Image (cartoon, helix red, strand yellow):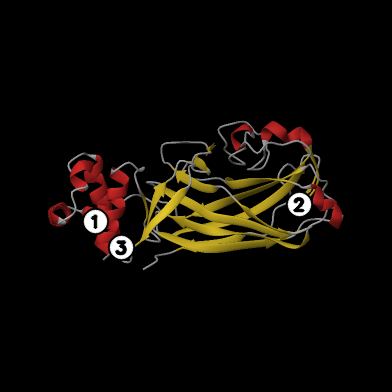
Amino acid sequence: MAWQEYLDAVVLSVSGAAAPMIDRHNNQLFEERPDSHWQRLRTVKGQSCCLFCSAFILLVSNRLITGKEMLKTENRTVRLACLAALVALSASGPLHSLVVSGPKCMAQTANVSNFNATPINGGSFIWFNANFTAKGIPSTGAKVYFRNSTIQFAADQGYSLIVPNAQITFDPSVSCVTTSYDPATNTFYTTAPVSGSDEIFLTGRAFAVPAGFASVGGKVKGSVVWQGMLGSDNEGVSVSWKWGAAVYTTFSTDYSALQVLPAHGNSCTSGGGDHAGTPEAFTQFVVGGARGGGGSNFTGSWSGSQDVSIDSCH
């Protein structure tokens, strides 16, 4: 049944839909919709199915098996031929080389902190930003991922903010840290040297403060919880992460316009000693509130650090 579901999903893709994407950790197949969101098509048990499906998609994309042929499935002859080809592939070479890259393991993490007592005016913005350090990065490099992240707090009502994903590539060929934002995938992509930095930008979220904050004196009630899934493509990596939040009177929700400082010590762009996550294009608009006191505190004071060990999932 798992094979049938995977092949049906691929038939959908070659008959007009976008190419599917595989989430190896959850064994789920996704299709990219016109609004740039991913819609789950199938969930399949067993990583071996994921391996063979990866090879199958590559065969389709290389036109060894055309979309027209794939649609001739009434007697399932084509499907059976595909399966036979995949079995032959697995016997003749290392099929793992065909797997879509991604995290080998994802670990749930949460970091809880509080805001200061300074009222936050409606119409202003809160810039939530997180940074991290990593250990166990091999000399050949590795990737760290932060996914499905949300920030939850209560003020005039309860809020749960969806935060952009993050992918950090530790590359032995680079000597300084860069970051960019891709709105199509809602992801911050950062590249860092293997040696890392004392603060590497993880991800951030701009929140436009509504007028309703005034009904509670402009204050957040209780704790602020930032949670998500941390992972790596290399087992044995450990991450220590923390976050801050600062208030700005003028800001942008176009993250590409913020000029986010990607690191504290060895950023490829000059930050004058500012902390990782500083929105360099808007520093003149920072004021007190959230976890910041204004002035030169562009990220807000840091929360406590959360240590996450990314071990084998198996």
- Residue kind at label 1, given as amino acid type: Phe
Decide if residue 99 is in sight here. Answer: no
User: At numbered mark 2, what does the secondary structure look like: helix, strand or loop?
Assistant: loop
Which mark's residue is nearer the viewer, 3 or 2? 3
Residue linked to disc 1 = 52
Q: Quick one: label 1, few (<14), some, or many (20+) residues within 10 Å?
A: many
| Residue type highlighted by circle 2 | Arg
Q: Is residue 92 left or right of residue 48?
A: left
For the residue marked with disc 3, what is the amino acid?
Gln
Q: Nearer the viewer, residue 71 or 122?
A: 71
Q: Earlier in the sequence, mark 3 or mark 1?
A: 3
Q: Dot 3, how many residues are within 10 Å of its Cα: few (below 14), some (14-19), or many (20+)?
A: few
Please give left or right for residue 185 compared with residue 215 in the image: left
Instruction: Answer whether labels 3 and 2 touch (C-beta < 8 Å).
Output: no
Residue sitting at x 79%, y 42%? 123
Q: Which residue is situated farthest in the front direction here? A: 74
Sequence-wise, the earlier of marks 3 and 2 is 3
Point out residue 153 in the picture as x, y percentages from the top left corner: 71, 59
Residue drawn at 18 percent across, 44 percent down:
69
Instruction: Give the Cα distance between marks 3 and 2.
Output: 43 Å
- Front in this rendered view, residue 118 or 264: 118
Q: Tell me whether the residue at label 3 lies in contact with that at label 1, contact meaning CB atoms closer than 8 angstroms.
A: no
Q: Which residue is mark 2?
A: 291
Give the residue at mark 3.
47
Query: SS at mark 3?
Result: helix
For the point 35% across and 48% down, the residue is: 20
- Compared across the picture, whether 177 is left or right of 270 comes to left
